[in-house]
Image (cartoon, rainbow, N blue to C red):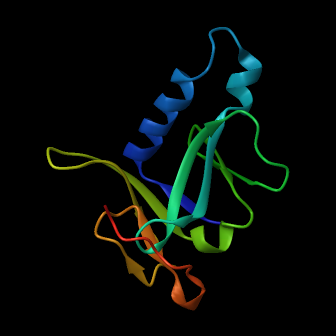
């Protein structure tokens, strides 16, 4: 399983992880990570989900990227294989940007994608 974080994305995620950990809790720091998954939704059919967690699901795949632990939802793994996650900080847009080789189409909002014939129906952007 390959998921790549750019230097900016790793820094941002590491900041979120450390900022959500209670002081002096070394156990929480050791297991705290970022859970990546794909959910049905968005305007193209699938949307990305990122959450900070200290308790991965039993079937999550564990990947270490620099100083960040990534927990990848096992059911989402085929749709996230090879994804590159970047962080953009600009005047017009800021946030995480996903470059997904499995996506056959992306929504203009950048938050959702299609993946061949298996994509569920999307909901128009609002």
Residue found at x 55% / y 81%: 119
In the rendered image, the residue lying farthest to the left is 91
When the figure is inspected, residue 53 is found, relative to residue 46, above or below; the finding is above
Task: Give x and y (percent) for residue 120.
Answer: 56, 79
Residue found at x 51% / y 34%: 14
As displayed, is residue 21 above or below residue 43?
Answer: above
x then y, percent, for residue 125? 33, 66
The extreme right residue here reads 58
Q: Nearer the viewer, residue 75 or 2?
A: 75
The extreme bottom residue here reads 117
**Residue 59 falls in image quadrant:** bottom right
The answer to whether 15 appears left or right of 54 in the picture is left
Using the image, determine if residue 110 lies above or below residue 114. Answer: above
**Can residue 7 be seen in this snapshot?**
yes
The percent position of residue 101, horizontal first and vertical second, equals 48, 77
Q: Which residue does the image show at 46% across and 71% down from the upper left? A: 100
Residue 1: x percent and y percent? 67, 66
Give the image quarter of residue 43. bottom left
Left or right, residue 31 beside residue 19: right
Q: Is residue 101 visible?
A: no
Please state if 113 lies on the left or on the right of 28 as rendered: left
**Is residue 7 shown above or below 113?**
above
Residue at the image position 58 percent from the left and 42 percent from the top: 51
Q: Quadrant of the C terminus?
A: bottom left
Count every numbered label the image shows and give the total.
0
């Amino acid at each position: 399983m390959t998921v790549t974080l750019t230097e900016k994305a790793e820094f941002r995620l590491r900041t979120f992880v450390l900022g959500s950990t209670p002081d002096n809790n070394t156990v929480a720091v050791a297991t705290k990570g970022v859970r990546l998954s794909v959910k049905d939704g968005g305007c193209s059919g699938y949307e990305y989900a990122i959450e900070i967690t200290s308790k991965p699901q039993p079937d999550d795949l564990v990947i270490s990227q620099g100083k960040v632990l990534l927990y990848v939802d096992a059911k989402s793994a085929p749709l996230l294989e090879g994804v590159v996650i970047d962080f953009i900080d600009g005047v017009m847009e800021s946030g995480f940007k996903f470059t997904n080789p499995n996506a056959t189409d992306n929504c203009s909002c950048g938050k959702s994608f299609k993946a061949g014939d298996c994509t569920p129906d999307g909901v128009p952007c609002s």
